[in-house]
Amino acid sequence: MKKSYEQLTLAPFCYSVPSVGQSCKAVIILFIPQLVMLFLTQSIASLILIAIAIGASILSDITDSFVRNRTYVLTSSVVLQGMLIGMFIPSTYPQFKAFVIIYMTLLLSKYAFGGFSQAWANPAAVSVIILYLFGYREFPSFLIDSTILQGSDPLTKLISQGKFQLCSFDADVTVFLNTKIFHFAGIVLPDGYVSLFWDTGNVIPAMRFNLLTLLATLYLISFNLTDWLIPFVYLLTYSIAVRIFGLLPSAGLWFQGDILIALCTSGTFIAAFFILPWGGTTPMTIAGKCIYSAIAGVFTFFLNGCGTGSIGTMFVILIMNVISPVIQLIEDKIYLFVLDKKQRVEE
Amino acid sequence: MTKIKKLQCDFPQYKDLVDAYIPPYVIIPLLNADGVLCPSNVMDNTRVSEGEIIAQKTKLSPAIHSSVPGIVLGSRQISIPNGKKTNGIIVRTDGSFSYLGRKLQKNDWKMYSPADISSILYDMGVLDTFEKTCSLSSKLQKYTEKHGLLKNSVLTVRLFDSDPTVRTGEFLSSRKLEEIIEGAGIIAKSAAIGTIAFIAASDIKKVTEKAAEILGSTSLTFHVFTAETNVYPSGGKREIKLLLKKNKCDFSEILPVDAQTAFTTYEAVVLNKPVLEKYVQFSGTPLVSEKMFRVRIGTPIRKLVEECGGFRQSVYKIVTNGLIKGTAVSDLDTPVTPDLQSVTFLPKAIIPFQKQVNCIRCGGCHRVCPKHIHADKLFSYYYFHTEADERILKLAQECTLCGVCDTACPARLPLSQTISLVQGGLK
């Protein structure tokens, strides 16, 4: 108690929102089940790459502090940034190469823009894109092609072509869900959707455990630990686009696109909840955020199509980082216009 | 504005008033209501009576009284609840009380002129605690100098606290409503205002009945309004103005006071009693029991903690005057002062993360600000010397420093404090 008496702090002593540190720590903790799942599924290479990405992120932060002659303090945002990068690296990616690229990208980003939330471009997205540019062969190509999109059940075709592996318990759980739950609503769940949510088996960890990601985001939104508006509008726009136009180019069918495949096979959930709303890169008004995320949703449809894209989402985020300052400029102009109008009324 | 249920803290409720024990000694700060350090009028080892003036700068400045009868032991530097340090006189309690336990004769305030009332308020050391603490006399003087000729003005009396974590004003209003109404009448007379508006959190029927009963015999007219207290800010001057406007009561100027000010005015003018006591809320999970005290000015908060049964868990911070705009104090020997409304003890487990990071441009401060001020832009203007539009800087002057932007900042930036610096720099 005596120790704390030596410290004086500024008001307030209660807040309506959690701090950035609290949110980052919560996200890190909620990613632990995914790491455990990687371990249990013997994806040791992915775990090593995630550790390498975290290490590179911390080391770049230490180097930056050293160069700027500051005392180094480890922050949770640095760990989270590394973890997010690691989640988007294919397990086959050369580890040393990954370390060097991530370290250099983050260091240059810090040197050019400053620390957390100072960069206009999302450092995690930029790092993954540079990893892709230097090793695009390691990133899986699209599984869904125009032949699969000829009909309205692309997942069954993916399974039959051996492009998508089912979990061992997929059939049993599907039968259980169809007979005990969906039966009452008259819905029949085809095989494969359980695996789509539980483990897609992708070489990129961010595209694997969708159910765990959704549960984590549910917790974060319930406790106000993350922004829900941007992910919600983004996922909604992308889903609508996929549903309406998904099968239009190849099969000429409207309203037949498969939303679940699109959302579960491109790391869309993790990107939507943890990378797209990254501090410092989004507009500030509610309208601006909605426009930002809706445009992102449309771009995702153009770059990722009906899913299984491994890098499209990261390019979308980079494009949005370029568009975001324009939206913010418009926001400022509108604000000043309203202010002017108000001051004229008062005068 | 932000909904108060969103604030991550407890909102205590109190049923009973606890008269705190008379302390064995009191430490009375020599800083008067206007924040001026006053020279002591008493020598060491001399006897003082309860309510005796022990310090006063000039005759026309707020006086400081001894809250207990006793012997002056000396003076020393002390910490006070607003976080500052000042000199204080230590009085050991001894002898008989002049006010405590005696039936005080009531004066007819309607016989007094505004000048008489003003003089009494100075002598009795009455404070205005509506926003920034100052002497009520000085506030009334400034008001009459500026708006004295305005006929269409109103005295507003807030019957609750502006900080939702403080319940002292609401508690006092429920217990001493008649006195508060009469005190409001006195202030209105002193400021030559013909209308009083009572702003209540609830139970406006009771306020209306009592006000009709007490003010019926005067020329004063009154209104009673309910404030929307489930949001913050709701009790500031701006919010009260908006409330009046919403209720189609368009006054050119308002003079706002709070329940505590009206009550001490009543005691000073009607009972001729100086400010010797204070209603103070003691709350926080580390306390064995939370209490609403009526306590002597100068009582060290340590003594009141003992009356609460002590601590059941270790305390990490002691916060005075509410969790939104309050101050962290570092000493349990900090005395109760006339401007103290509440003391909150926070354990480590519920201390919010206050580590400051760079602005994450979430726009939270824009959305909650009732004046639509862009606090983040003013922050970077002040600290990073970025360019800010003149209109944004002009708007900063309208900030009431309610601190709602601080509560909505995930980066934990001291936004309202910075706006106050910007305001100072531009004046």
Image (cartoon, coloured by chain):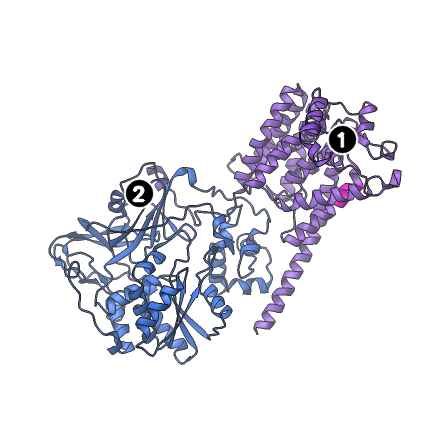
The residue located at (56%, 60%) in the rendering is B372
Provide residue A251's location: percent of width, then percent of height.
Answer: 88, 38
Are the residues under marks 1 and 2 on the same chain? Answer: no
Q: Is residue B421 magenta?
A: no
- How far apart marks 1 and 2 lie (CA) works out to 65 Å
Residue B130 lies in what quarter of the image? bottom left
Which chain corresponds to the colour purple?
A
Identified by mark 2, the residue type is Ser
Q: Is residue A142 visible?
A: no
Relative to A313, is A55 on the left or the right?
left
Vertical position of residue B401 compared to residue A125: above or below: below
Q: Secondary structure at mark 2?
A: loop
- Nearest to the observer: residue B51 or residue B226: B226
**Chain letter belonging to callout 1:** A
The residue located at (17%, 65%) in the rendering is B104
**Chain letter belonging to callout 2:** B
| Disc 2: which residue | B289
Q: Secondary structure at mark 1?
A: helix
Provide residue B40's location: percent of width, then percent of height.
Answer: 21, 60
Q: Which residues are magenta?
A: A297-302
Vertical position of residue A275 compared to residue B211: above or below: above
The residue located at (36%, 41%) in the rendering is B285
Provide residue A208's location: percent of width, then percent of height.
Answer: 69, 28
Residue B50 lies in what quarter of the image? bottom left
Which is closer to the viewer, label 1 or label 2?
A: 2
Identified by mark 1, the residue type is Phe
| Disc 1: which residue | A134
Crowd rating for badge 1 (residues with CA inside 10 Å; few <14, some 14–19, many 20+) = few
Relative to A225, is A298 on the left or the right?
right
Crowd rating for badge 2 (residues with CA inside 10 Å; few <14, some 14–19, many 20+) = some
Which chain corresponds to the colour blue?
B
